[in-house]
Amino acid sequence: MLKITNLKAKVNGKEILKGINLEIDKGLYFLMGPNGAGKSTLARALSGDPSLEVNGEITLDNKKISELGPEDRFKLGLFMGYQIPPEIKGVKARTLLEKALEKHGKRVDLDELAKMVGLSPGILERDVNVGFSGGERKKLELLQLLAFKPRYAILDEPDSGVDMDTLRKLGGVLNSCKDACGILVITHTGNLLKFTEPKKVFILANGRIVSEGGPELVSDIEERGYSMVIE
Amino acid sequence: MNWWDEVREKAKDWRNLPMPEPKLDLENMKIASKEDIETARKSAEEILERLGIGDEEKDMLLGRTVQENNQIVYKAMREGLEKQGVIIEEMNLAVKRFPWLKDYFFKMLPVNENALTAYHTKYWDNGVFVHVKNNVKSKSAIHAYFLLNESSFAQTPHSIIIAEENSEIHLVEGCSAPSIVENALHVGGTEIYVGKNSKVFLTKMQNWPEYVHTRPLTYARVEKGGELHLVNIVLGGGRTTVEHPRIDIVGENAKVVVREVVLSQKNAIVDLGTYIHHNAENTSSQIISKTVATDESRVITRGVIYGHKRNTKGYFSCDGMILGDKAKAETYPGLAADLSDLQLNHEASFGKVAEKEVTYLRTRGFTEEEAVEMILKGFVSPALVDVPLEFRVEVEKIIELAAKGF
Ligand SMILES: Nc1ncnc2c1ncn2[C@@H]1O[C@H](COP(=O)(O)OP(=O)(O)OP(=O)(O)O)[C@@H](O)[C@H]1O
Ligand SMILES: [Mg+2]
């Protein structure tokens, strides 16, 4: 279980997360909330981003990870797929992935995975995210979910700005992973519901989890917006 | 007096000429003796040891291959090259062997421009002479310095490269053997003549210990349809390194590509910049400069692409990364146009290693050190395409050291 207890986070001195409590088991979970609510900040706090000032406890299968650096959290099986992953000039995507996999003691066929997420094979020969389209960046993050096979994953808007075919593929990937992995998908829409179903949906607003429920919560919000859960 | 000694006379008043910054007290610079060289070689060996450089490369970088039995091999190699039409000769001998060299000798280097150019002219000693004959194309990299006996020890070497019409040569200059003593000075001069439709590739790596002041004086002339590819890698930066090559493009359709990599360390001061003059139509040039400043070093990268003629295409990119709080780096990429019918562009970016990128890599399991290393290697890589493997290895070792101190 990935357990978050009273997690607070400040960015540049401003408190963004004001005490988050959340538990995730194996399976698929959604995290929704208005723009600027703090969803990405929560993802970064979980991943161990050192630019945030974080308080509170995070445990991964009963092991406390809140004091660990990002690389150690990753080693213990936590993966974060970025909403907007950075460009790294001069570093080929393939080189990055191969090195990371080697360190991680895993071997996979990257070309096979590229095909699975709908990336053209040549793209791995390009610098990481440099000149990638929005959708291509999302796919490279998704490819890494498949490559690293984490125990828990936070995927920050993997469905934003991707085409219909990719959305379908994403649904398929989530379905194939969710038995072995606890996945928290940050999303703004119910588009994925056509292909997969979350166990639970959390709503984050103003730095707190203000509501949680089943998949029906997604359609409620799609219909009526966040006013129904935020007073 | 021989014509090559007469040249020295022109520079006899070197003491009265202005000394460019950072100033050097030339009178009190030491010139190394053979014993000094041995001592320095040992300390350089220690440096290379610390860097974890392999034995074979170490030998090469220390100029140790220049030993009795190798001399025979190298002599045979030089004879082989000479049969093909590539002459490689020590300058002290070349001036005697080729009287016509007079027309090229100190013809580009402006003898009395300043105290350094004049000092070099007055005291030039050995260097490498490379002559590629008409239509001769030599495509494999030649370590010219190591094919010669004495020139790697000289501290004021004067080198001349002449590529005749329609020829091609690839030269590699390792970090001239560290034949250097405390407070030592190295003022080498290089004159490069790129003939019609010929191609010259010169890759140079300098890795001086932290007590060396070096002032390479580099000049080149590129004729119609010619190409000059210069790669200059400065590792460490010695105590001070100042190099401002001047390249004149004099014929149409000629092309110049310059790539510079600076990885400065300790308290080095490095001032590097190429000045390219487009004196003919339809010519192009490109300067790509990558700086990584570490420790307390200070780096200035500069240079100007001058468009004097129609249809000049010039591109100047200058990027720098600064590690830690004590290093400093500045850049002044310059473009100057005498007319409007041309195209000159530049880009520059200087800053710290992006924290976002480091964090991203850490979330993929890399330590901070590994992340910085990967980012820095990626950063310099565009300037290292086609650079010989042994140089690349050394660049990477220095980056690994830099990342450790991050
Ligand atoms: N470096 C920063 N400096 C100042 N404010 C920041 C910084 N980073 C994030 N914030 C602020 O923190 C708040 C939460 O941002 P976050 O990215 O977590 O929102 P989000 O819920 O992911 O929004 P979205 O749905 O738009 O992706 C926002 O108001 C944002 O402007
Ligand atoms: Mg977000």
Image (cartoon, coloured by chain):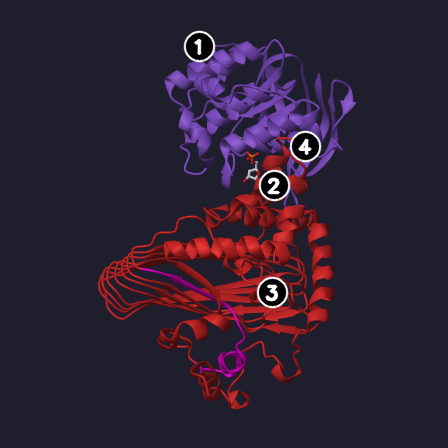
Chain colours: A purple, B red
Q: Which residue is mark 4?
A: A71
Rendered residue at 65%/36% (across/down): A49
Residues packed near mark 4 inside 10 Å, few (<14), some (14 to 19) or many (20 plus):
many
The image position of residue A1, as x and y in percent, is 71, 16
Query: Hey, what amino acid is under mark 3?
Result: Arg
The image position of residue B247, as x and y in percent, is 38, 67
- Callout 4–callout 3 Cβ contact below 8 Å: no
Q: Which is nearer the eye, A39 or A25?
A: A25
Q: Which residue is mark 3?
A: B298
> Where on the picture, by quarter, is residue B324?
bottom right
Return the mark for residue A181: none
Q: Which residue is mark 2?
A: B358
| Location of residue A177 with respect to A226 vertically, above or below | above
The image position of residue B256, as x and y in percent, is 35, 58
Q: Quadrant of the C terminus of chain A?
A: top right
Q: Which residue is mark 1?
A: A194
Residues packed near mark 2 inside 10 Å, few (<14), some (14 to 19) or many (20 plus):
many
Q: Which is nearer the eye, A23 or B359?
A: B359
Highlighted range, magenta: B111-133
Give how far apart the Cα atoms at labels 1 and 4 are: 35 Å
Count the marks: 4
Do circles 4 and 3 both sit on a common chain? no
Rendered residue at 49%/19% (across/down): A113
Query: Hey, what amino acid is under mark 2?
Result: Val
Give the structural element (helix, strand or loop) at label 1.
helix
For marks 1 and 4, give the one nearer the viewer.
4
Q: Chain of mark 4?
A: A
> Where's ligand 1: which quadrant?
top right
For marks 4 and 3, give the one nearer the viewer.
3
* Label 1 vs 4, first from the N-terminus: 4
